[in-house]
Amino acid sequence: MSNYYPEGRLIHRASNLHALSSPSTLADACRDGQILEARAILCDSEHNLIVDLGCMKGIIPREESAVGIREGTVRDIAILSRVNRPVCFIITGFDTAPDNSPIARLSRRAAQQRCRQEYLHHLTPGDVIDATVTHLEPFGAFADIGCGLISLLPIDTISVSRINHPSERFTVGMELKVLVRSIEQERITLSHKELLGTWEENAAQFAVGETVAGVVRSVESYGIFVELTPNLAGLAESKEGVTVGQQASVYIKNLIPSRMKVKLILIDTFSDKTIPQPPTYFLHGNHMDQFLYSPKHCEKRFSPSF
């Protein structure tokens, strides 16, 4: 899948820069059907995108700007929002502008169709691909998984530790790894928490007796859940004045793998708006056969299916 990238990942690559360097290299890219990227600089009154190729301008006709525009399933705001951003495309030919300058005919739709077909025919559940967050909603994060194709990352698949909104974990433009959970009816379903490590992998970063940073994720009658990592939380005794979302310092009282428990003592809490940091991944390959979150001999078994 290395030929397909979320938009913005290809624009500075050497192969892309070379293809955009002259009319002759653009002609070669046209002949070879190479997927390229450049910045859209204008959307005209007919909603055609004008793209700066460096050595000449290119035009993506409205109906070639995205899969779904021609069919009416995607609104034109998807075109307007690409202005001043990198767009992927295939060069379909060349014309001469009214001022006799050359202009390239481009199709973003064709690049997306190629990416989609490649994914639908070759991706399997458990595959890991690149993604870039495009926008956030209360129910999940939308991400570009290649050539501007958007897929949903539901909020309950983002991490083991529960969050109220994806903005607590991601920012728009953040680069991610995502796991393919299923492919049904030409829809690719994603997950993320499996890549953030097991209970043991996360617990190994801590030791009894340490005082560490955390985030209050839940306040219950029987105690306070504090997140230590996106895939690890512990329980502290109740304390007045603590609210969800506060930063915390906690003392690690005990780690119990057999019960998948982290016992904490809440030292202090304070309110502070923090910017989510890029995730730390424990899987470095491009496929996961299975994911067992709980320790091998734990009383509880937690193994999300995909």
Image (spheres, rainbow, N blue to C red):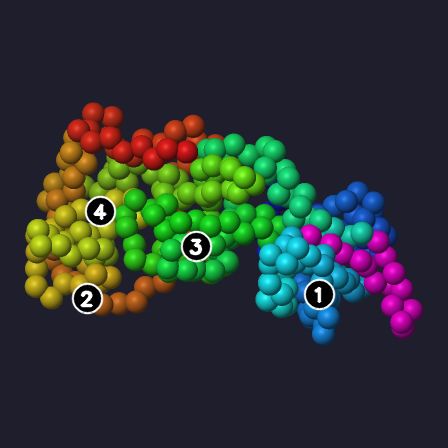
Give the mark nearest the N terminus, 2 or 1.
1
Measuring from the top left, give residue 184's x and y in whole percent.
Answer: 51, 37
In-front residue for pair 276/192: 192
Residue of label 1: 49
Mark 3, secondary structure of its residue = strand
Amino acid type shown at disc 4: Ala
Sequence order check, earlier mark of 2 and 4: 4
Q: Work out whether residue 119 can be spotted.
A: yes
Question: What residue do we see at 68% from left, 65% from top?
Answer: 40
The numbered disc on residue 270 is: 2
Q: Is residue 87 visible?
A: no
Would you say 298 lies left or right of 50 here?
left
Label 4, secondary structure: give it.
strand
Residue 233's tag is 4
Q: Nearer the viewer, mark 3 or mark 2?
A: 3
The crowding category of the residue bearing disc 1, from other C-alpha atoms within 10 Å (few below 14, some 14 to 19, many at least 20), is many
